[in-house]
Image (cartoon, rainbow, N blue to C red):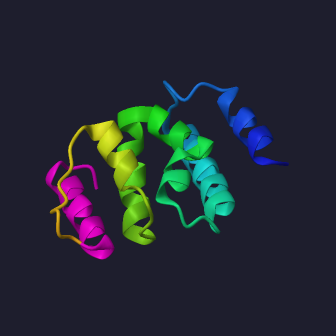
Amino acid sequence: MDTSQKTAEHNNSSTKNISGGNLVKKFDALTSIWREETACFSSITKIIKHPAYQEIINIGAEAVPLILNDLEKEPDHWFYALYKITGTNPVSPDSNFEQAAQEWLQWGKDKGLI
């Protein structure tokens, strides 16, 4: 199944008003597709423009705790999604990737999201 088929399959069901376990399943499926299909990308722009990543952003605020938990387990390019959803950026301009992950995680802890 190619990218467009996988993404279309996920787009057929609404990402709004997904409850509990279904939200986790949706997030996990989209994350898996995103990681699999962008693993060889060197362009951050291509990584964050991937349809599965954009679908995660479309989930909205309900995705933030899931993204933060994933970031804690396996740091990845979640910073743009977190910024787009929350409208905030707790990362210092001189932070490296690992520091940025830690700053987002601290923000999540401060907000009671993780």
Residue at the (54%, 29%) spot, across then down: 15
> Quadrant of residue 31 in the image?
bottom right
Magenta stretch: includes residue 64: no
> Quadrant of residue 13 in the image?
top right
Residue at the (20%, 43%) spot, across then down: 88
For the magenta stretch, what is the residue range? Answer: 96-114
Q: Quadrant of the C terminus?
A: bottom left
Q: Is residue 21 visible?
A: yes
User: Above or below — where is 1 with respect to 106?
Assistant: above
User: Above or below — where is 92 with respect to 50?
Assistant: below
Residue at the (41%, 53%) spot, across then down: 67
Judged by its main secondary structure, the magenta piece is: helix
Viewer-side residue, 93 vs 27: 93
Residue at the (17%, 62%) spot, across then down: 93
Viewer-side residue, 75 vs 114: 75
How many numbered marks, from 0 up?
0
Magenta stretch: includes residue 104: yes
Q: Position of residue 4 (x, y in %)?
A: 76, 40
- Left or right, 114 with respect to 6, comes to left
Viewer-side residue, 76 vs 107: 76
Give the farthest residue toward the right: 1
Q: Is residue 65 visible?
A: no
Q: Position of residue 47 (x, y in %)?
A: 54, 55
- Left or right, 94 with respect to 78, comes to left
Q: Position of residue 110 (x, y in %)?
A: 14, 54
- Left or right, 33 with respect to 28, comes to right
Q: Position of residue 24 (x, y in %)?
A: 53, 46
